[in-house]
Amino acid sequence: MSDTMLKGIYTPNVIPFHTDGSINEAELRRYVDWLIGKGISGLYPNGSTGEFIRLSFEERKRVVEIIADENRGRVPILAGAAEANIDLVLSAATHYAELGCTAISVTGPYYYKVSQESIEHYFRELARLSPIDIVLYNIPQFSNEISVEVVRRLALDCPRIVGIKDSSRDMPRFMNTISKIKPLRPDFSCLIGCEEILLPVLLMDGDGGTIATSGVAPEVVVKLYQSVTSGNLAEAKQIQFKILELIETILGAGNFPEGFREGVNLRGFNMGRARQPMSPGELNHFNSISSRLACLLGECGFHEAAAKCKNPSTSANSPALKNVNIDAMVREIMQKL
Amino acid sequence: MSDTMLKGIYTPNVIPFHTDGSINEAELRRYVDWLIGKGISGLYPNGSTGEFIRLSFEERKRVVEIIADENRGRVPILAGAAEANIDLVLSAATHYAELGCTAISVTGPYYYKVSQESIEHYFRELARLSPIDIVLYNIPQFSNEISVEVVRRLALDCPRIVGIKDSSRDMPRFMNTISKIKPLRPDFSCLIGCEEILLPVLLMDGDGGTIATSGVAPEVVVKLYQSVTSGNLAEAKQIQFKILELIETILGAGNFPEGFREGVNLRGFNMGRARQPMSPGELNHFNSISSRLACLLGECGFHEAAAKCKNPSTSANSPALKNVNIDAMVREIMQKL
Amino acid sequence: MSDTMLKGIYTPNVIPFHTDGSINEAELRRYVDWLIGKGISGLYPNGSTGEFIRLSFEERKRVVEIIADENRGRVPILAGAAEANIDLVLSAATHYAELGCTAISVTGPYYYKVSQESIEHYFRELARLSPIDIVLYNIPQFSNEISVEVVRRLALDCPRIVGIKDSSRDMPRFMNTISKIKPLRPDFSCLIGCEEILLPVLLMDGDGGTIATSGVAPEVVVKLYQSVTSGNLAEAKQIQFKILELIETILGAGNFPEGFREGVNLRGFNMGRARQPMSPGELNHFNSISSRLACLLGECGFHEAAAKCKNPSTSANSPALKNVNIDAMVREIMQKL
Amino acid sequence: MSDTMLKGIYTPNVIPFHTDGSINEAELRRYVDWLIGKGISGLYPNGSTGEFIRLSFEERKRVVEIIADENRGRVPILAGAAEANIDLVLSAATHYAELGCTAISVTGPYYYKVSQESIEHYFRELARLSPIDIVLYNIPQFSNEISVEVVRRLALDCPRIVGIKDSSRDMPRFMNTISKIKPLRPDFSCLIGCEEILLPVLLMDGDGGTIATSGVAPEVVVKLYQSVTSGNLAEAKQIQFKILELIETILGAGNFPEGFREGVNLRGFNMGRARQPMSPGELNHFNSISSRLACLLGECGFHEAAAKCKNPSTSANSPALKNVNIDAMVREIMQKL
């Protein structure tokens, strides 16, 4: 059984592109370095937020090479390896193992509908052949669901499968996953991929999450995790409700994951060209949401974003939450780090 | 604004029938009296668990009459009034107000798909005309969803609308509901209708729930609520995970809500004939699940159910949870009551 | 086995209401008489278009009483009897049999999700006990789907079940229904409840349809049926494409079935108050669609509707179809009747 | 505007693999040659049946190279080019244009949910830049739906977009597509990707289809098309109902598209290893369905398949359809070719 257990806040990595569409390696390195400096627990390249499906196989491998090189072993890397067929997954897995990654994350097969029996068989084959630990990635919005019963059987039979990252937004399902697996395999990582319920998940013995918002406001998400660890439930709740505002604004910006890319821009990076183009009408909407996101990030104390907030007074639709003092909290954590 | 706020554990009432299909009034009275004795916070007739849709209008009114009479004002009654059109809802509302109910619960219109704009208009009309407080009942599995945005506007504009009972199983939605309404209207009741996430909901400032399992094992659900109130999170978690087993078994019994009806039978009542008949094959399955449910209830310390457990050793599929000492916890609470 | 086979165009009956919300009996009689005069094959009260779910049990029975009385045996009546439980369905069935109806139409159970096994058992029980022939009503948008396999078994085993009315909009399903049942029971009526595919259904050996548009423009739908019967495929296609325009406009008017109610108004009747109120914004939209529908009906040669067309030149978004001479076709059929 | 209009039966090409997982070029050439000999109208590599998503970008390009080379200009090629981002689609498009393909087929973006506005913008960009005609590929089961309204606007504005291949199984949608586009752009190809409704589609002015069953029984599907062309509706109906049996059996074999691969095996080819492995239990089921499919193909007069039918008497679940004389029909067409 694995001696490393995935815990805490993993950050799905958005990818900066040059105007010619190629990966902007320098900016990716600068961004990864910044994230690690903010105290995140691990990096997560080639997830849905990282638009793995819009990169070529070679680009996906290059992304992990850059990130692993820049990381220099500072934090664990969970590398997305949801390739088109099992041979390609294993080829990627071997490469990511050689690069020193901690585990790979693999979705259920996508595009086609596939039976639970085939999904189970697929992961058993992967577990048998993979040179690196595997995290199941459940995201039924985009690919075939991996049922709790299949997860349970895989967890009990396959030491190579060390956890699940669940982005289904389905809290009853997450509760059942914990309830059915943790008593029998306590070191099986149960990570959530949905910031709206990060706090309840942590309170119910979840191990952490792959939280896309932590790519935009790592200070805030890391602070929530620390508040739970230190038993400060009141503070954790305040932060959780602030994260709800952030994620709603980000998801309202347009096609996933453009809002996250813009959030990173607002923190001082240059994500560059989008891989999925937006229409002029959508760009207009996007720009107004960008301003609102800038205001929200400004309220959290991020001055580089505040500068781009055009209309501070109307930014918050939940005035009572405005005074949550994330700013002060953030300063506190920055001092500790 | 209303001076009564709905809080705690409301029990959706299953309805006992005679063999000729009519309501078994004596058994219903005995059952309601038993529930109140177990410490539930309120009664909830004519919900989905009470098969309101399979009763006639007259039967629905009769159910509330019996329950209100038997209750004698001991606990608040939230009466389901999801009638076929607004005139009938108001007619029911007037009757339930006269019977001393605390509020009515109304789903979005069912059967047809209806726009959010119409749903909002419908509830504004109801709020304008109703002689009794209204709880919105969101259950998108069976009827039109009431969007969070509509709930928010209704909550801010309509004093008559005093809360929401959300059975959508959607925790991110529930978090957003709390986040957007509570800061502006703290007395707006946010009740969950999904026992799998009762504990996280209570920890995130939810006010309680309409919990069908509390009709089968009121001691267990009431104990969870008290554990949270008294700050014993570890105990609350143990109970929550036990409730997961109970609800999974109950829902696996067959067509909703037959598993709940059987659970009440196992506690010593006679629910009688089902309104939706089962095939012979389904009855076979039902009986095997009934035995398993008996074992689970037996493990909780309910001796009348334990007697019907045919195969105790194989009952639990989560052996590590078996030793949760609900039995002792239950004794403790029984002494207090 | 039944000696009457349901065939042709059945018209789902919308119900006129007085301003106090009660059924407008005189207008209903006038409307039914008009429909029969236009040559429809049968009447269909208490369907989804007739808002059965928004009427009380007593009102539903009254609707059939009025229609049967006004009909005086001129056309067969298929009476909707999708009541809340099997006892009430049978009670309605007995009443409708006494009134001389040809058959009842019953949906799968609605509101709750119910297994196919239970649905089959439910219809077998109904078939065993019903004093009148039964048509299965498949409308998965609003109630539980009845699978083709269940339909097939019921058709082969239960003489009382004489047909299916399928409103699923699923042509592959309809093809399979015909393919699996007709060779073994040729007199099993396969009716479609979707005007968009009426012509292909008739060409593939379907027996007809319950076509809501025939309540607004009976001349047009009856003409399509006659074109098929007389082998004039080119004419039938022209009419089918015209019906596509009509139904798209009607469905775009707002909450179902308000567009149908307005269409009947435009033909010179007074449907009165809606049972599901519309918001002011929705009413605005509704009025503009009403004008467009008036123009479309005017193009079909219905002068009473043409008078309410405010902007004839912009009414049609498919100019090439504008010249379909329904007007002349309609005159031709009116002479024959 | 394009001078070539896509018409008739296009065959989606399944891909044979060696035991090491690589493409079996020799068998692919033999298969393509056989298909052309059977009279299909065109070839369709890299569709869903061809498992494009499970091939690498290089393999997809190689598939088209082999097929174009073997085809030697005998029939038009519609090449699937649903690549991961617009740069890759254009790169593939350029290659396929150079190989002499007639058009490329492109799905709406998959994996992520994308707005209709973005989808329209995406195809407008493609149409502006592509060196080859484009067929829209609507398959909402697997990728984002392209709404009829977007199809209409693209058809009217973009000469490069020459048709739609619709695999949605949604006949009302197909009717609307024809109704809204054909009067204004008669040469816009409307192809169906659903064999269950091929005949009704052809009768309603559809131009043909990409019909996966034609990869297994090209004689049968081609015969249906010719029956329609020659006005023999009765014969066409018989064949259509036979195709319903074939497709139901093929789809029941297991994960898509294994049943099609097995059908081609039964016709005397060696498709080899599956890219998505099956569990032992699924393989058992697969083998029993394979035998049933062999019997069905045997009934159509294909002797090489009949030899693998283990239990002819129980093969058909629609006895009345058994005697459809596809055998004789097939001989007739073979003589003509």
Image (cartoon, coloured by chain):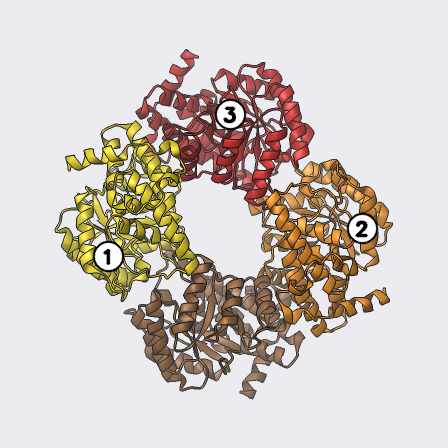
Chain colours: A orange, B brown, C yellow, D red
Q: Residues within 10 Å of mark 1 (few under 14, many from 20)?
A: some
Q: Nearer the viewer, mark 2 or mark 1?
A: 2
Q: Which residue is mark 3?
A: D11
Residue C171: horizontal and vertical position, in percent? 38, 39
Q: Nearer the viewer, mark 1 or mark 3?
A: 3
Q: Which quadrant, please, contains the C terminus of chain D?
A: top left
**On screen, residue D295 above or below D72:** below
Residue D5: horizontal and vertical position, in percent? 49, 22
**Numbered mark located on residue C129 in the image:** 1
Q: Nearer the viewer, mark 2 or mark 3?
A: 2
**Would you say residue C134 is visible in this rendering?**
yes
| Labels 2 & 3 near each other (Cβ < 8 A) | no
**Numbered mark located on residue B261 in the image:** none
Q: Which residue is mark 2?
A: A31
Residue, x 20% and y 51% (percent of image)? C31
**On screen, residue B163 above or below A127:** below
Label 1 to label 3: alpha-carbon separation: 51 Å
Viewer-closest of B121 and B101: B121
